[in-house]
Amino acid sequence: MRERVLSAENFVPLPRDQVFPFFADARNLETLTPPWLSFRIVSPTPIAMEKGTRIEYRIRLRGIPLRWHSRIAAWEPPFRFVDEQLKGPYRLWIHEHGFESQSGGTLLRDRIRYAVHGGPLEPLVHRLLVLPDLRRIFAYRAARLRELLLGESPGALLGLPSPKLSFGGS
């Protein structure tokens, strides 16, 4: 299994104590996920976020309906939390969400350790399918986050820089 790392950074000009609660509400994950994934939370809401919380989702990946089960592996408000896939489209998915106070706002840091399926075709599956999807997902998420937290219109977001993304092992 080839493990990869995706890192993303986004700056939001709001204090951490206003940003973290948005992420602490699991329902907001639906709002931050691109519509083309048809992402829906299946678990009853509201969801009490804490270490050990399990959440079940439904998504459509390239038209294929899938279930995704995750568990909150670490919960350290307002600094970080980690969710890990128990069942879903990846062989491995461990997503650390970090919230760092900076002058004038909060730096959001995402670090995802992941591995994809595909056997001997895994490098091709990653390059042609997974990598482009992850880039689109995180670009959408950054724009949507600014729209929701800052009230910026989608048109105003067109001139903003894309989130800082880096991929290790790809």
Image (spheres, rainbow, N blue to C red):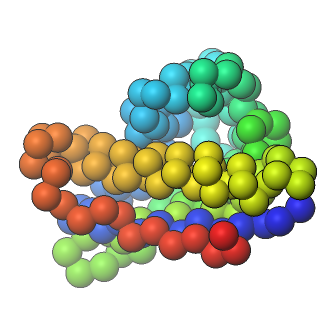
**Residue found farthest to the bottom:** 103
Residue 90 seen anywhere in this rendered image of the structure: yes
* Vertical order, 59 against 93 (above or below): above
Near-viewer residue (48 or 10): 10
Which quadrant is home to the N terminus?
bottom right
Q: Residue at x 30, y 62 (%)?
A: 162
Left or right relative to 91: residue 124: left
* Vertical order, 58 against 118 (above or below): above
Which quadrant holds residue 57? top right
Near-viewer residue (151 or 6): 6
Left or right relative to 37: residue 156: left
Q: Position of residue 164 (x, y in %)?
A: 39, 70
In this rendering, the count of numbered labels is 0
Q: Position of residue 98 (x, y in %)?
A: 51, 67
Residue 92 seen anywhere in this rendered image of the structure: no
Q: Position of residue 40 (x, y in %)?
A: 55, 22
Q: Position of residue 26 (x, y in %)?
A: 53, 36
Q: Residue at x 81, y 37 (%)?
A: 87
Q: Residue at x 74, y 38 (%)?
A: 89
Q: Residue at x 24, y 65 (%)?
A: 161
Which quadrant is home to the C terminus?
bottom right
Left or right relative to 46: residue 28: left
Left or right relative to 148: residue 113: right
